[in-house]
Amino acid sequence: MDKWLNFGVLQTSKLAYQLTKPMLFAKSAQEAHKAILRVLVRLDASSIAQVAIRQLYQATFKPHPVTVGGVDLPHPFILAAGFVKGHGFESEHDALIAGRHHNIIPGWRTMPNLVGVVEFGSFTRHPRMGNDGVVIWRDIETHSTQNRVGLKNPGAVGASAFLAGRKADLPTVFGINIAPSPGVDDLEQEKSDILDSISAFITRGVRPAWFTLNLSCPNTEDDPSSHQTEAKTRMLCRAIQDLLAHETNNTIPLWVKISPTLSDVQYRVLMRVFADEGVSAVIATNTIPLPTPDNPSVMAGVGGGKLHDHAVRVAGLLMDEKRTYGYLVDVIGCGGIQDPISYQHFRQHGIVVAQYWSGMIFKSPLMAGTILAELEHNA
Ligand SMILES: Cc1cc2nc3c(=O)[nH]c(=O)nc-3n(C[C@H](O)[C@H](O)[C@H](O)COP(=O)(O)O)c2cc1C
C-alpha cells in the first residue's frame, strides 16, 4: 500500500511540474534559473514552507540507505554542485556584510529539505562575480544544459560565515565542493587557497559529510585540464588529506570531481593517485566543454543528455581500474541521469550512487525520488 501511495504522490508531483514547466521554459534558461533562485530565497525564509517541503520529501523519497566514499546516505542520489552555490561578490568584505542581512546562498535550506542530499558550491578562496552576459543555455531536444557561469560564488569565507550562522538548520548530510582559484599559476598559492577554503568551513564549525575537490571546472579562462595532471593532483590531494587529518582527525572524507575529456591513460593514472592518497570517492564527471549556441568560438560546459555517454564511459573505465587493482576509491556517476534507464547505465558498471543537475530541470525537482520509486514499482 505504502509503495502505491509513494508512487501516487510522485506521479502527482511529476504532473504538477509538467504543468509548471511551460511557464519556466517560456523564459530563457538564464532567466528561468534566476526566477528559481528568487523563489528559493522566499522559501528558505519560510519555516512553514520548509515543513511542507520536508513532508513532500518524506512522501516521495523512500529510504534506500547506502554508503559511498565514507559517507552514509539516506538514498543513492545527490544534487550535484552548482545549484546551491550562492551569489557572486566583488570582495570578501561585501560577501560578509551581505550575508549578515540577506540570503546569499539561495536554496541552502529548501533544496536539502526537498531532495535530501546536496553538494554545496563550488566555492573558491575569494568571491567571484563569474562571467558576463548569457552564461546558461538549455537544449530541450537532448535534455542538455550548458553553462559558463564561471564559478560565481561568495567565496569560502563569505559562504562559511553565512552557513555558520544557520547551523541549526543545516542538513545532517551535505557536501561542500571547493574549486581552485582560477587564474592562479603559482602552485603553492593554489594549494594554500584550497587549504584556506577548507579551513574556513571547519574553523567556523560548518562540518560537511565530505569535501569535494573540483579539479574540473571548464568554465573559467584557465586551462581546465591543467589541474588534473598526476603531480598536481597528488600534491593537492596529499595537502588536503594532511589538513583533514590534523583538523578533523580524518572524520571528513575527501572526494574529487574530474572532467570527461581526459585520455584513458590519464584516468588510469589519476585513479592510482586517488588510491595512493586515500581519496574516498571520485565523481565522474563534470560537464563537457562544447561551443555555445550564441558563439561557436566560445566554449561552455554541457551537462545532461549530451554528456551522458561520455560520463558513463569514464565512470566505467574508473570502475574497471578499481576492480583490477582493488582500489578503495568509490566511483560516483554524474552525467545525464534523468530516468531509470540513464541511471541503470551507471549501475551496469556497478555504480550505485549518482549525482544529477540537468534532470532536475527537464524532469522534475523530485526526479531522484521518481527514479527510485519507478525502479521499485517495476521490480
Ligand atoms: C548552471 C550550472 C552550474 C554548475 N556549476 C558547477 C560548480 O560550480 N561546480 C561543479 O563541480 N559543478 C558544477 N556544475 C556541473 C554539475 O555539478 C554536473 O557535474 C553536471 O551538470 C553534469 O550533471 P548533469 O548531466 O546531471 O547535469 C554546474 C552545472 C550547471 C548546469
Image (spheres, helix red, strand yellow):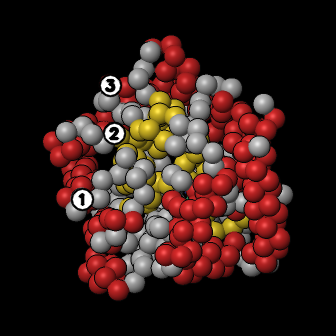
Quickly name the residue at label 3. Answer: 276
Identified by mark 1, the residue type is Gly
Q: Quadrant of ligand 1?
A: bottom right
Q: Earlier in the sequence, mark 3 or mark 1?
A: 1
- Badge 1 marks a residue whose secondary structure is loop
Relative side of 203 to 297, left or right:
left
Q: Report the side of 378 relative to 224 (left or right).
A: right
Residue located 42% across and 57% down the image: 171
Mark drawn on residue 205: 1
Which amino acid type is shown beneath numbered disc 2? Answer: Pro
Q: Residue 346, image x and y in percent?
A: 66, 33
The quadrant in which the N terminus is found is top right
Question: In x, y percent, where is residue 206?
Answer: 29, 59
**How far is disc 3 from disc 1 in space, using C-alphas?**
29 Å
> Of helix, strand and loop, which one carries label 3?
helix
Residue type for callout 3: Asp
